Image: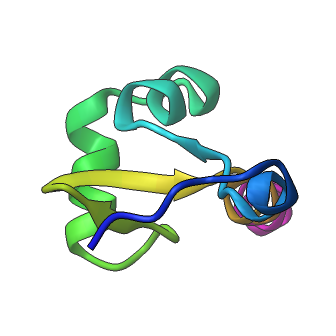
Amino acid sequence: MCQNVTVSNMDKVIESYTVEEVAEALKLHPYTVRRLCREGKIPCFKFGGQWRFRKDEIDKWSRNQRGKR
């Protein structure tokens, strides 16, 4: 069932990245990003058969990864 998005619901819309956007931001190959998804090493979810990434979770994850190097 589809729902109409109204102005009052717009603040609840999840901002997300695609594999390509995450790969570019993290300076990784898209295949590496997909592998990290399959291995559960990066926060992601599938939407319509494609990996997606919540912007806030990727920002937090990338900050934590820098501290581990």
Quarter placement of the C terminus: bottom right
User: Left or right: 5 with respect to 22?
Assistant: right
Q: Residue at x 19, y 55 (%)?
A: 48
The residue stretch that appears in magenta: 61-69
Residue 40 to residue 42: above or below: below
Q: Residue at x 20, y 37 (%)?
A: 31
- Chosen colour scheme: rainbow
User: Left or right: 38 with respect to 59?
Assistant: left
Is-magenta flag for residue 64? Answer: yes
Q: Residue furthest bottom?
A: 40
58, 6: nearer the viewer: 6
Is-magenta flag for residue 29? Answer: no
User: Left or right: 18 with respect to 66?
Assistant: left
Q: Within the image, what quadrant is residue 28 found in?
A: top left
Q: Residue at x 28, y 65 (%)?
A: 46
Residue 26 to residue 38: above or below: above
Residue 21 x/y as whole percent: 50, 26
Residue 29 to residue 42: above or below: above
15, 10: nearer the viewer: 10
Quarter placement of the N terminus: bottom left
Q: Residue furthest left?
A: 49
User: Left or right: 55 with respect to 2?
Assistant: right
Residue 7 x/y as whole percent: 82, 48
Our reading of the magenta stretch's main secondary structure is: helix
Q: Residue at x 28, y 43 (%)?
A: 32
Residue 27 x/y as whole percent: 54, 24
Residue 48 to residue 28: above or below: below
Residue 59 x/y as whole percent: 79, 53
Number of numbered tags placed on the structure image: 0
